[in-house]
């Protein structure tokens, strides 16, 4: 029962082949080399450097998500994709909530509209 044909097929379908891993690795190496080359060669103007590096980083992130974490729309990859999206949403909620709490604490606890003399007069 542990090695039933459906379990073996499901286990093999969820993982990539050697060629897909190699392709992902080569693409990541090329993107890393491009990022390094953009910075060191100074071919791109300084004001375009940050958007270019960001674009290459996002491209590398997408390559790694597809080739190494096996995120996609295929039925056997759907669980990984849903877990990744829900994890991203959870992180966004925690970060947004933390920023909201810190902003409200700063606004409500710091008497910036009150002078020192006026604060002493209230005591």
Image (cartoon, rainbow, N blue to C red):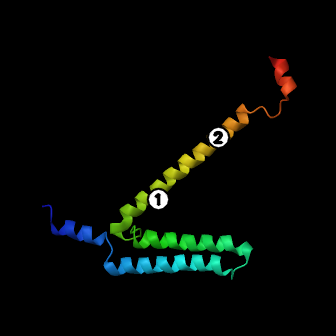
Task: Judge whether 7 appears above or below 99 on screen.
Answer: below
Of residues 82 and 52, the one nearer the viewer is 52
Decide: is 67 above or below 93.
below
Q: Find the residue positioned furthest to the left.
A: 1
Reply above or below: 114 against 48.
above
Secondary structure found at label 2: helix
Front-most of residues 85 and 106? 106
The percent position of residue 53, horizontal first and vertical second, equals 62, 72
Which badge, 1 or 2, is on the more N-terminal residue? 1
- Please tell me the numbered disc located at residue 85: 1
Relative side of 38 to 25, left or right:
right
Q: What mark, if any, has residue 68 been given in the picture?
A: none
Q: Locate the C terminus and report the quarter of the image it occupies.
A: top right
Q: What residue lies at 64% left-to-right and 74% top-to-bottom?
A: 52
* Gap in angstroms between the C-alphas marked 1 and 2: 26 Å
- Identify the secondary structure beneath mark 1: helix
Residue pictured at 54% horizontal, 79% vertical: 33
**Whether residue 121 is situated above or below residue 38 in the rendered picture:** above
Viewer-proximal residue among 15 and 27: 27
Report x, y in % for residue 98. 59, 43
Locate residue 69 relative to residue 5 in the image: left or right. Answer: right
Q: Is residue 3 left or right of residue 57?
A: left
Horizontal and vertical percent position of residue 19: 34, 81
Alpha-carbon neighbours of circle 1 within 10 Å: few (<14), some, or many (≥20)? few
Residue 38: which quarter of the image? bottom right
Query: Residue 79: horizontal and vertical position, in percent?
Result: 36, 61
Judging by the rendered image, the residue that carries numbered circle 2 is 102
């Amino acid at each position: 029962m542990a090695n039933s044909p459906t379990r073996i097929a499901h286990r093999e379908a969820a993982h990539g082949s050697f060629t897909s891993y190699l392709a992902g690795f080569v693409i990541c190496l090329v993107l890393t080399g491009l990022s390094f080359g953009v910075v060191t060669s100074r071919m791109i103007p300084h004001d375009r450097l940050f958007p270019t590096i960001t674009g290459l980083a996002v491209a590398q992130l997408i390559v790694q998500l597809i080739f190494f974490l096996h995120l996609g729309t295929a039925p056997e990859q759907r669980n990984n994709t849903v877990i990744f999206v829900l994890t991203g949403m959870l992180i966004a909620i925690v970060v947004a909530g933390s920023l909201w709490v810190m902003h409200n604490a700063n606004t409500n606890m710091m008497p910036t509209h009150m002078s020192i003399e006026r604060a002493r007069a209230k005591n």
